[in-house]
Image (cartoon, coloured by chain):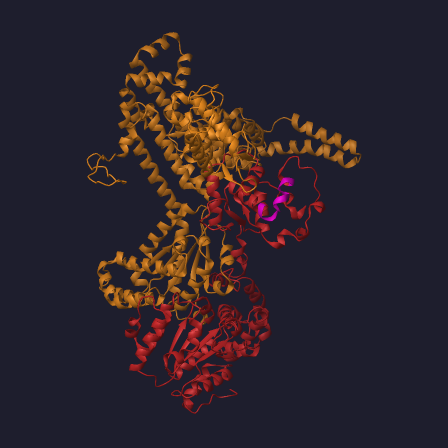
Amino acid sequence: MSTSSVSKGCFVFKPSAKKRKTLSPKDYFSDGCEGAENSDVRFKLCQDLWDKIKTDTEVLQDELNRKILDSLLDFTRKCSSTRQHSDWALQMRASEIPTAALVLGVNVPDHDMTFQSLSELLQQSVTPHVASVQAKECGALKHLMKRVLERLMDTVVAVDDDEEEAAEQTNGQVHKSVHCSLNTLCDWYNTVTKKSNSGTPGKKRSSPVKDEQQQPPVVVIFKDLEAFNPRVLQDFILICSRYIDRLPLMFIFGIATSPSTIQHMLPHSVSSLLCIELFQSLSCTQHLATVIDKLILTNDFPFKLNSKVMQVLISIFLYHDFSVRNFIKGVQLALLEHFHSQPLSVLCCKKKDAQLNVMQLSHRNLERIKQLPSFKRYIEKQEPQEQASLLNDDTHLKEVCKKLIKDLHKYHKNYYPILSCLHTLTSSLPRYPLGKQIRELHLTCLEKNVWENEDYQSAMKLLKMLAKDELITLLQRCAEILQPVKSKKIKEALVHLEELLAKLKQLDTAAAAETSPTVEETITSPMKNLQKKTDLFQLQKTLLEMNESRRSKKLSPFEVLRNEALDFIDDLVKKHLSPPESHTLNEVCYYSSSATVRRHLNATPRTCIQAALSSPYYYLQNENLKTEDGSVSNAAPDICIAYKLHLECGRLINLCDWLEAYSTVVSAAEGNDPDSDNFGKVDDVKHARFIRAVSELEFLGFIKSTKQKTDHVARLTWGGC
Amino acid sequence: MTTVLQHPAYEEERLQRVAEQLPCRELQAGMLLSLMGEPQHYSYPSIFIYGHRASGKSHVMHVLLKELELPHATVSCVECISVTLLFEQVLLSFFGCDAASLLPRSPSLSDFVRVYRQQCSHSPAKETRYIVMEKAELLRDTDANLLPALLRLQELVEDNVTVILLSEIVWDKFRPNTGCFEPLVLNFPDYSKGELQQILSQDRHPSYSAEFYSSYINILLGVFYSVCRDLRELRHLAALNFSKFCEPLAEGKVKETDTHKLWRNIEPHLKRAMQTVYLREVSSLQWEQMQQMEEKETGALRGLSAHTHVELPYYSKFLLIAAYLASYNPARTDKRFFLKHHGKIRKTKFLKKNEKTSNHLLGPKPFALDRLLAIFYSVVDSRIAPTASIFSQISSLVTLQLLTQVSHDDQLDAPKYKCAVSMDFICAISRTVNFDIVKYLYDFL
């Protein structure tokens, strides 16, 4: 690049428009992705899948929010309607500002969506005047007022364009002279409501609003109450309360922690101006459970996460942020990564499409299939002749793949219903041997054979102690779960289950009469003995006897049936809940790189810096820097050498010694003769390089200057060599 | 009525009307009237009126000025975010909006005086003009010259104007260091029980007799007078609970005169009201619904402070615990709690003189980020990488007001925090993660 300027200086060169090619997401996707030949197909699959996931979760979130939003809307309507009654009690009552305290849970970024839909709903059905404010834009009362006024007046501008100009004209002078006071707002409100009332009916706004109430309330939403300056909030409320008879105001407080914050923030003199009603939203763990139910534990999406990735995502949620949004983002990341890095992900789609895609597979991709660990295991199990044809005959391989894909889909179809059956059975057991939440059970099932798990055994033992009515209700619930599933195997299972249920119910009428006396007899006879003897030893003995007799006793018909039912369940579990790793071609659908997900979602800046400093090869990829056993090559960047040397020091580092050591290392790198006089001498350049390295380390927070000793610096990290 | 307001300048009838609207404040109103003198006379430059909340300060001023049709401007100081608003409102109500628009952008006091004088020369005051400043205590936070200037505004603008300051705080707390013109100080005492009874009885329900309502007020005051003397609140409570009081009457069980039975019926109800609506634990709307729902579901509604449980992510809980420990334990004792081989250090040996008082009485102390993290890593049972989300959790705890940042926001290097949660809260939190916090607190050693 050159300039026509004669003077020296820095010049900015904007890249010319021609060169700048805007890349579409697709280009980014194909760029550097594994197996580029079918990247288009994969990109399309990925995008379709993500779109579906996105819309589904949005619908789900709307549904979850609906209940609380509905009650909130009711509240606003009620508030605005009671205002117009001319009741004695209402007149005498101090006019409070109706306030909804909306408790949303600690993850504040997640609330945005809720507030978004809330204000949309409010605008649609209750009032056009909604303003939402955030704490960070309202440091002082002035700013808060300004924001509220701006948003309220702007919303109107956005809603009806023709009114805007008129309002501007009438308010023009007043607006200039009286800035930012609620008086202005009152005037504005009056003009707006008057206009909408006198205007031609049913012009633009949704009609029910107009019929019901002449005065739609003015709603102010405080998105994050905790972060507001209490002083500002108090003053704002005081001001508003002066205008409440002229301006039907209403507040919504978004609360992240607990409603008692209101009392912490507002003194009684202020909170007595509010009429606070509490709205509690769904807790975020429940929210996650529903999302997992709809997103992960379903057959709708061919894309799956393996247990480790699931574990990472769930632990980020539980341990770090409680953010459902981040969880979904995590799923999105996994999805992208899967389609980006796994060429065989073309097969990760609906069964029919997958069958078609199998036929389209190129030779290279078929080779890739042969390399899959699960497929290798599959080949090993085949006859030698079959093995040979699988390895050599592409068309045969395709046929087999088709079948295998079909099997995989079948497996998924059966897996989820049986999983939720098992969950219903075990989730009510004492101490939850298989976890309270279905996701925990899902994780154990993904990891290994669940039936080999100790907890599973104990759960089965506990199930064998269930009373009849409990068992019947549980089995009935299982039957309900299996009812809608359209799989042959599940249908058979359902028939069997219903037979068992019928038998259990019949016990009530017929068999119960026969068995009960015998059972009672066996129990009561030692009981009688018990009353006679008072000796402790004897008591122990009889109790043991009772226990023995019960165990050796012949099983009652109910117990027989119960065992049969549970064996049947056990059978189902063994048949359908095997981990996905045992299924051939699972790599196509399951994303397994938990390390990638962890690295992207749970960044560790300090570890990265330390890795860069202690092994520069990791980032620079320069062959010269490659070393073994964790040492640093002397050709490494200055800062790496300085860092390495500083690790060898104690809490205080003598700068002079450090410089000496540094210069020795650098001299060696320059290939100076170790025996010459100049070796290790500090010259100006080395000195400057050293100083720069040290100040960089200080900037990164590894050392700081100290007043304890003048020519020393203090280390800020522990450990080292 | 014992005393009727008298003043030669105003008609008898008008004063009568004023007196009717100001029950139990005749004395103060009379005093004010005599201070104000005849309308065309100059009045005292500034009057300072103080008295508790709802002792009728604004009401008396409002009624006097309105009924006697005196030119006045009422300004609430809370509302005046900037002095501009104050000036504008005064000019607006005295000279109309043209005058207000004469003020330049962000006007100074002298601009105000200039505009005032200019307008004043066009339309000089025929009667004394009054500027009433409500919540005048906020004037102390504005520019230092505003309050002294307002006190002698009469001199400054050379007009017949009187500034009346209304406040809940005594004048002594106002006096600026530099000294100022002393206003006339007037106190509005609290209403006595009898006076409250008299005032509250006035707003009776149209469909019931005055005696009946008065007896209701008597019962109400019997319950609430010990905790609340705020007229506004009492009136609010009276209105909320009246329907319940009338219930047996409507059902025909008792007669209006049977006060004892009525008292028996309402008293427990009022007691409950004292614990809930009065403290705004339950909103008045909910309270009314509750009354309609009958007794069976009472107690189902929990007050605001009953919800103290906060759900936090696992590591946030431990961060909060660590912050609590850092705030309430002296830094020297960290070794004893978090090192494996600390040796037995007894508390008595450890004590310094000033540490004998409980740290919990002294409140949380600030601590540096390093210390927080060091304690965090030693209390949390698993090894965790110092990920970005651990740090972001600290800042979200700050936004949730569970921690407060002591150092300035700009200070990126070694920020300091304080833990802002109570002992009960932290105990509840640590119970959920099976951490026995009491064992780690120096105060409970």
Residue A675 among those drawn in magenta: no
View extreme (bottom): residue: B8
Query: Which residue is at a point 41% across and 39% down the rendered structure image?
Result: A326
Residue A90 appears in the picture as rendered: yes
- A626, A592: nearer the viewer: A626
View extreme (top): residue: A385
Residue B334 among those drawn in magenta: yes
Relative to A135, is B87 above or below? below
Examine the residues drawn in magenta and state their main secondary structure: helix
Tell whether B39 sits left or right of A675.
left
- A262, B71: nearer the viewer: B71
Tell whether B265 sits left or right of A175.
right
Q: Which residues are magenta?
A: B326-336
- Residue B275 position within the rendered picture, expressed as x and y whole percent measured from the top left: 56, 62
- B151, B283: nearer the viewer: B151
- A593, A514: nearer the viewer: A593
Tell whether B381 sits left or right of B443.
left
Quadrant of the image occupied by residue A525: top right
Query: Which residue is at a point 54% across and 58% down the rendered structure image?
Result: B298
Relative to A427, is A84 above or below? below
Chain A colour is orange
Quadrant of image for the C terminus of chain B? top right
- Residue B59 position within the rendered picture, expressed as x and y whole percent measured from the top left: 45, 77
- Residue A702 position within the rendered picture, expressed as x and y whole percent measured from the top left: 49, 36
Q: Which chain is red?
A: B
Residue A285 appears in the picture as rendered: no
How many marks are shown on the rendered structure?
A: 0
Relative to A369, is A168 above or below? below
Tell whether A706 sits left or right of A44.
right
View extreme (front): residue: A677
- Residue A46 position within the rendered picture, expressed as x and y whole percent measured from the top left: 31, 31
